[in-house]
Image: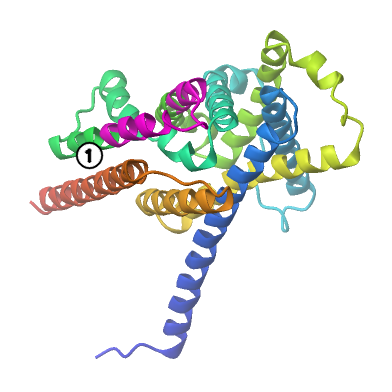
Amino acid sequence: MYQPLETDKENLFKKYLRILAVVAAYWVISILTVFVNKALLSGLDLDAPLFVTWFQVLTSSSICFVMSSLSKRFPRMFNVPSGNPLDKEVFRKVLPLSLLFTAMIATNNLCLKYVGVAFYYVGRSLTTVFNVVLTYLLLGQKTSGNAVLCCLLIVVGFWIGVDQESLTESFSLIGTIFGVLGSLSLSLYSIYTKRTLQFVNQEVWLLSYYNNVYSAVIFIPLMLINGELPVVMNYEHLAEPWFWGVMSIGGVCGFAIGFVTALQIKVTSPLTHNISGTAKACAQTILATTWFSEVKSFLWWTSNIVVLVGSAFYTRVKQLEMNQSHRAQMNSQKV
């Protein structure tokens, strides 16, 4: 009988330790990014949310460009795929997704600007529901009855959360609407990402590079239409180093969350990523209410629990369905 060697145990321990480190990094960076963005959008006395978002994608674009350039000069030290966002064929195929990417991050930040961090998760909790609806409408893929019941549970939690939040001074109808639009655009982005990845050889990092570059350009007319240019130019702290310092921190956080999200999916699985994200959202809500000394009602907390349970059950249902489908496929191959 084979006896596990010490080296096998060490390799397994290192593997688990790496997974734990990546998940911990995702939690820390994700929660930190939400709090940093909230501070930038609501705490700077600068009514220019699209400008703040534009600076973040510009920072991400710059980091991607530097890493791509370093990879060409020092391929042994920096192993990232090379690409040219100015290529006409790339532009034509990726631009539709970049428009959705721009809508997604803009609505998410606008939601965060107007609602509290504690309510942010519930405000954007309809992503799973939109995924099911849009997958059926756009791809013709049906969803099981159990998964639909989970979605109904999420909708109930969302409705209770909005109802309870409306009784507080921090409630924002426009912020809630942006949260729903953010969930919708995220669902559309996820669906069209699968279609667009084939044009970049399934390279997630390269697609992120293109999205950030194109989004940085798309945001310019949006900022002008929203009248943010004079607001920014007249901002009293515009020339102060600390302002650009905190803006740069927000930009780095924006890049980092995209990186650690992809890394967590890579070292675990999309399913584990969803479970981790759901648990992180729970911790984020508790941390936010403690940090901002917010007192919430029993029904308000109930809404969060219902949304979390609905999301967790949905993930479990999809896991069981995937396992069943995999077993059926393996059995058919044996026959």
Left or right of 323, for residue 81: right
Furthest residue in direction top, as rendered? 225
Residue stretch in magenta: 155-182
Colour mapping used in the image: rainbow
Please report the residue visible at 23 percent of the width from the left and 27 percent of the height from the top: 141
User: Overall secondary structure of the magenta stretch?
Assistant: helix
**41 versus 335 height, above or below:** above
Residue 39 percent location from the top left of the image: 67, 40
Residue 124 visible: no
Furthest residue in direction right, as rendered? 239
Q: Nearer the viewer, residue 250 or 141?
A: 250
Q: Nearer the viewer, residue 27 or 265?
A: 27
Tell me which corner region of the image, top left, top right, bottom left or bottom right, holds residue 161: top left
Residue 256 visible: yes
Element at label 1: helix
Give the amino acid at mark 1.
Answer: Cys
Residue 189 percent location from the top left of the image: 46, 27
Residue 309 percent location from the top left of the image: 28, 48
**60 versus 262 height, above or below:** above
Left or right of 200, for residue 316: left
**272 versus 39 height, above or below:** below
Q: Nearer the viewer, residue 320 or 266?
A: 320
Q: Quadrant of the N terminus?
A: bottom left
Q: Which residue is mark 1?
A: 150
